[in-house]
Image (cartoon, rainbow, N blue to C red):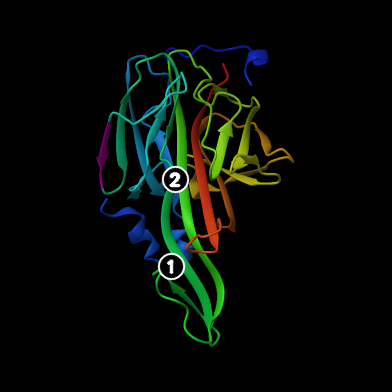
Amino acid sequence: MLGLVRKSKAHMLSSLGLASLTALAVSTATAHTPYIAPTSFEPVMGKMASFDASFAEEFFIPEAAFNKGNFKVTTPSGEVVNPDSKAELKTRIVLEHELKDEGTYRITTGARRGATFLIYDLDGEEKRVMNPKEPAPKGAEVKNHFQSITRADTYVSRKAPSNGALKVEAVGLQILPIDNPTELFADEEFTLKILLDNKGMAEQEILVYKANQEKNKPINFTTDKEGLAKLSLPAGKYLLRARYRGPAPEGSKVPTLSHTTTLSVQVFENI
């Protein structure tokens, strides 16, 4: 791990888009999870870093580009800027950004409002409508009516890590790292917090998927009453995912919002 400084345990702690996916059955569409990940999680010794943003079922294998994102970079000083460049491909969005200062950077897709789903039962048969202007037919029993909100985050460090970029927006479902996510080591505990509209979410499930793992069976964690979770993982690359479906704000076009948020990290060998 070039340039990675080991700290003591005491100091650690596109055109394709999602629309084509959601044209499939709901069970298939919701299986696709957003992510953004650097081409390398190793500490950046130069100044340029690149990232892929996509929807996938296996991580980190891109399937459909995370289009319509509001991509932002938070610098080590806490300043929020646009990425230097963005290219939209069919399977992924590719970002490049110059890391001018040493320290840790947050890269986010921002919140993406996706398809709306109206699910209803008519004469004993379940139906799905994706056109927000098309109501359920007369006599139908509405089972669910929601819109998907997706976002994905990751972090990289240029040389020594720092904590100025460890912050999230005040709106939506967020994963806030408490310990720096660019200096995680195998089997050592690190802490994160799940927030909804800037409030900690008690008893919120977090699914952790290891990259390139057969069948991608996740590890389950649950937050405490403050919304905090302490994780300990073997070495490897991981996608952390939280999901929540709840009431939409007053005046929304749908009664329910379905939030999915992810964080991509690497846990390094503890040597």
Q: Amino acid at mark 1?
A: Ala
The stretch of residues the image draws in magenta is: 85-89
Quick one: label 2, few (<14), some, or many (20+) residues within 10 Å? many
Q: Quadrant of the N terminus?
A: top left
Circle nearer the N terminus (2, 1): 1
Taking depth in this image into account, of 176 and 82 the one nearest to the observer is 82
What is the x, y in percent for residue 59?
44, 43
| Disc assigned to residue 160 | none
Q: Looking at the image, can residue 58 be seen?
A: no
Q: Is residue 159 above or below residue 62?
A: above
Disc on res. 111: 2
Q: Relative to 127, does residue 36 appear above or below in the rendering?
A: above
**Which secondary structure dominates the residues rendered in magenta?**
strand
**Where is 30 relative to 2, above or below?**
below
Q: Which residue is mark 1?
A: 25
Q: Residue at x 37, y 38 (%)?
A: 71
